[in-house]
Amino acid sequence: MPQNSIFDQKKKEFNRVRRQWKNAFDEFIYVKNVFDKAVGELNIIIINIVEKYNLDSPFSEDDSLEEPKKKLDEENSKVLFRKVAMMSHPDQSNTDDTDLFRKLTEAKKQGNINKIYDLAGELEIK
């Protein structure tokens, strides 16, 4: 008889936990549906605003605006690198300090544009 009562208790506990899981799952499905509906409505609002003000669609995959900016940054960093290199090169400067030039060449090899700008700041180059 005690085995039956233990089995019944385990079965009741299992059924209780299963009901809780089903309730939680139902609540998740409800929240997911509300979220999906809200996202759909937001997208419609965004599309209406874009059309009203004749703007570019924020949903497009067009990254053509990024390319000119990237090229401009590359060109600016090249010019800045040359200026810093000329001012810090051991043959051009009056000092024997080659540390700044070494840091500059390391930054160039690593493609660390921020470091190049920092070194330019040390030399007060704008």
Image (cartoon, rainbow, N blue to C red):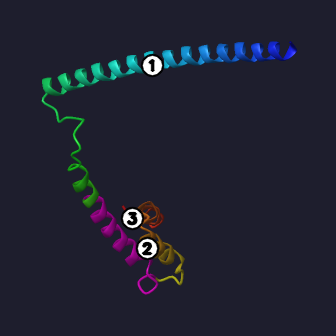
Disc 2 marks which amino acid? Lys
The secondary structure type at the circle numbered 3 is loop
Question: Which residue shows up at 65% across the image and 17% down it?
Answer: 17
Whether residue 115 sits left or right of residue 62 in the image: it is right
Residue 115's place in the image compared with 24, above or below, is below
The secondary structure type at the circle numbered 2 is helix
* Quadrant location of the C terminus in the rendered image: bottom left
Q: Is residue 87 magenta?
A: yes
The answer to which of marks 1 and 2 sits earlier in the sequence is 1
Q: Mark 3 points at which residue?
A: 125
Disc 3 marks which amino acid? Ile
Which numbered disc covers residue 29?
1
Quadrant assignment, res 82: bottom left
The secondary structure type at the circle numbered 1 is helix
Q: Residues within 10 Å of mark 1 (few under 14, many from 20)?
A: few
Magenta part of the protein: which range?
72-93
The reply to whether callout 1 and callout 2 are in contact (CB within 8 Å) is no
Q: Does the magenta stretch include residue 39?
A: no
The answer to which of marks 3 and 2 sits earlier in the sequence is 2
Residue 126's place in the image compared with 29, above or below, is below
Alpha-carbon span between mark 3 and mark 1: 59 Å
Alpha-carbon span between mark 1 and mark 2: 52 Å
The reply to whether callout 3 and callout 1 are in contact (CB within 8 Å) is no
Which numbered disc covers residue 109?
2
Disc 1 marks which amino acid? Ile
Quadrant assignment, res 33: top left
The reply to whether callout 3 and callout 2 are in contact (CB within 8 Å) is no
Magenta span main SS:
helix
- Asked whether 34 or 92 is in front, the reply is 34
* Quadrant location of the N terminus in the rendered image: top right
